[in-house]
Amino acid sequence: MKIATLGPKGTFSHEAALKRNKNATIVFKDTVWDIFESVSVNEVDEGVVPLENSVSGTVGLTLDALMEFDLNIIAEIILPIKHNLVGYGKISEIKELYVHPSTYDQCEKFIRKFLPHIKTILTSSNAVSAKIISIQKDKNKGAIVPEKAIEIYNLKVIKKDVQDNKFNVTRFIVVSKKEAKRTSRDRTSIAIYPQVDKPGLLYNLLGEFAKRNINLTKIESRPSKGRLGDYIFFIDMQGSKEDEKIKEALSSIEESFFLKILGSYPREY
Amino acid sequence: MKIATLGPKGTFSHEAALKRNKNATIVFKDTVWDIFESVSVNEVDEGVVPLENSVSGTVGLTLDALMEFDLNIIAEIILPIKHNLVGYGKISEIKELYVHPSTYDQCEKFIRKFLPHIKTILTSSNAVSAKIISIQKDKNKGAIVPEKAIEIYNLKVIKKDVQDNKFNVTRFIVVSKKEAKRTSRDRTSIAIYPQVDKPGLLYNLLGEFAKRNINLTKIESRPSKGRLGDYIFFIDMQGSKEDEKIKEALSSIEESFFLKILGSYPREY
């Protein structure tokens, strides 16, 4: 069993992939796109990618990849996100902080309060932040990294749990060429691209779910890479695409609009 | 007249601020938060911040700041986004590419096609990417930067217009302590925080607009910094908050939900 996820080792994605299957061979990739490609060409069996964080929001590149590739979401993984300040000096000695942009968003209040005048250097992953600190061992440098990275890169913790919100979680999805088996507690994810703009459009779309008492758990609009105001809607709902009422709602929407069913899979919350 | 925006000079934000008022004194800040703070304490008259890009989507930190500060949106600025590859060598000599994360999203296909095996270094702004190239003049280094930065840092262009989408535009907003004067072609932005989750909730909310024939131009859900599934809805509509039908819809929503009116302002598209 091979799983592709975002590397290098020590990322939250690494942790999520191990939570999916602790015995899997993990193949590390640089981008979400590379992971989708790897699953598509059968290099790996599954891909694990971040979809949204409760603080910093949706990962746009994952939504784009879901539209471009023909893969199914077969599972979700909810991972609590705990960040840690690491370095080889005291907090007052830090002059440069290495931090991934999403991590910055999730720790902004902490950084503004405890490290107000330092220089922030953005990195391409939390593991890269960890690596820089572990190689340079400079007391004027700090980084904010996950627990997994502390273990792998053998780092010194200056302060634990520096994330601004205690309920910070990331929702990962597992993508595959296969489909998931139907369960009694499923979620279904879809994308709708209306390609028109008129008063009440989204209202009428949502009416198809409301009148069948289908509970939507998420709605997100994302620019369709064309002009502002031209959106694709990403919608999650409770239930399986095999459920009679969901089947009805989707076929009714499909009569007028472009619809892509991204997958039905067991829900974790 | 003083305007705060994202620095250093040469960013798209700099360009947007000059489009707002070419005679203004521009005060450069590091973060969206700093800009809101600067307007709040009367250090400047207005703040210009990016709200959404037609390719990479909404700037989450701007939505968060709109919720936290008591400022009004008084104008929007639509800026075409054109990216350029710069450096001192040929495209085939580039080994390291300096690029801002949003710029990367907007030029991903170009980078994957023309610079497939290079190392990507993320920077905190397009102007920082430009600065690095202008100081180091290394033929193995390249950057992707706006036109304004080419002019300011006197850079050599390797390839113009490398953005993946010709229709790439960013919508900036102008925030102030004042309010905008009502016009005949306004847009109104609001945020609704329902704090409950039940089937049909969003449908019923949108019904208040649909039944009054109010045209929504955008809807976006953003996690309320609590748990996944707990969302704040950001909605834009055509018209002013002084229009009778919008007044009615908003006061009906306010009876049951937390509502924040972010501003009415002349619309540019």
Image (cartoon, coloured by chain):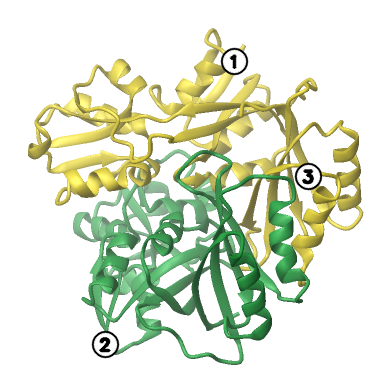
Chain colours: A yellow, B green
Q: Residues within 10 Å of mark 2 (few under 14, many from 20)?
A: few
Chain containing mark 1: A
- Left or right, A231 with respect to B263, comes to right
Q: Position of residue A222 (x, y in %)?
A: 62, 55
State which quarter of the image contains the C terminus of chain B.
bottom right
User: Mark 2: which amino acid?
Assistant: Met
Tell me: residue A189, above or below residue A159.
Answer: below
Q: Are marks 3 and 1 on the same chain?
A: yes
- Residue at left 38%, top 23%? A10
Frontmost residue, B203 versus A176: B203
Q: Chain of mark 3?
A: A
- The subunit carrying tag 2 is B
Q: CA distance from mark 3 to mark 1?
A: 27 Å
Please report whichever mark, 3 or 1, sits nearer to the chain's N-terminal start. Answer: 1
Give above or below for A240 relative to B102: above
Position of A27 with respect to B72 (left or right) is right
Read off the residue under disc 2: B1
Q: In which quarter of the view is residue B167 placed?
A: bottom right
Residue B236: % across, % down: 59, 70
Disc 2 element: loop
Numbered tag placed on residue A260 in the rendering: 3
Q: Position of residue A140 (x, y in %)?
A: 10, 37
To the question of a shared chain for discs 2 and 3, the answer is no
Instruction: Tell me the tag on residue B66.
Output: none
Secondary structure category for the residue under label 1: strand
Q: Which residue is mark 1?
A: A2
What amino acid is found at the position of numbered circle 1 in the picture? Lys
For the residues marked 2 and 1, what is the alpha-carbon distance in whole angstroms?
Answer: 60 Å
Q: Name the residue rendered at 63%, 42% in the picture.
A: A65
Disc 2 with disc 1 on a shared chain: no
Q: Which residue in the rendered view is the most extreme toward the front? A: B255
